Image (cartoon, rainbow, N blue to C red):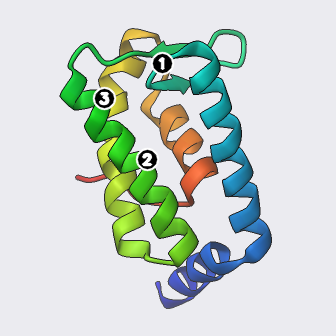
Amino acid sequence: AGAAAALAAQYLDDPVAKERRARERAEMDARIKEHSCDYIITGDKRRDAVVQFSNSMASIAFDMFRSKAADADIAGDDKLRVQCCQSMLQFLEPLARQSGISSSAVKAQLEAEYGRFEPRR
């Protein structure tokens, strides 16, 4: 377990990995702006699922989690980053299921943007 934690920490601190995640986030931000939506689930490359929360408070909360996760990734605050990723996954899982996209695909997408994390149990 100690070796796995050390490897995960190295991955999160790796400047190349951080830059790759920042690029993923910037691409998503551009696509969100282009589609005027809250998020885009890209679990199936042939058809993206555009997410538009019907509740404005959900939209605000999700945007806050995205922003805080990005800031935490940049600052190296792993605990906050993981908490925000877990919250985003909980927001997106029901919407992904409705679109036929698996939770694991959504988790992989979030990890590409924010780094590895384990879902809440």
Corner quadrant of residue 62: top left
Q: Residue at x 35, y 55 (%)?
A: 84
Q: Residue at x 57, y 25 (%)?
A: 32
Q: CA distance from mark 2 to mark 3?
A: 11 Å
Mark 2 vs 1, N-terminal side: 1
Whether residue 111 is visible, yes or no, is yes
Q: Is residue 72 left or right of residue 86?
A: right
Where residue 44 sits, quadrant-wise, is top right
Give the side of residue 97 with respect to residue 40, left or right: left
Give the mark nearer the N terminus: 1 vs 3.
1
* Residue 34 in picture, x, y percent from top left: 64, 18
Q: Secondary structure at mark 3?
A: helix
Mark identifier at residue 66: 2
What numbered label is drawn on residue 59?
Answer: 3
Furthest residue in direction right, as rendered: 16
Picture coordinates of residue 21 (x, y %)?
A: 67, 55
Q: Secondary structure at mark 2?
A: helix
Q: Amino acid at mark 3?
A: Ser
Residue type at mark 1: give it: Cys
Task: Kindly report the distance in space between the C-alpha atoms of the residues bearing marks 2 and 1.
Answer: 14 Å
Q: Which residue is mark 1?
A: 37
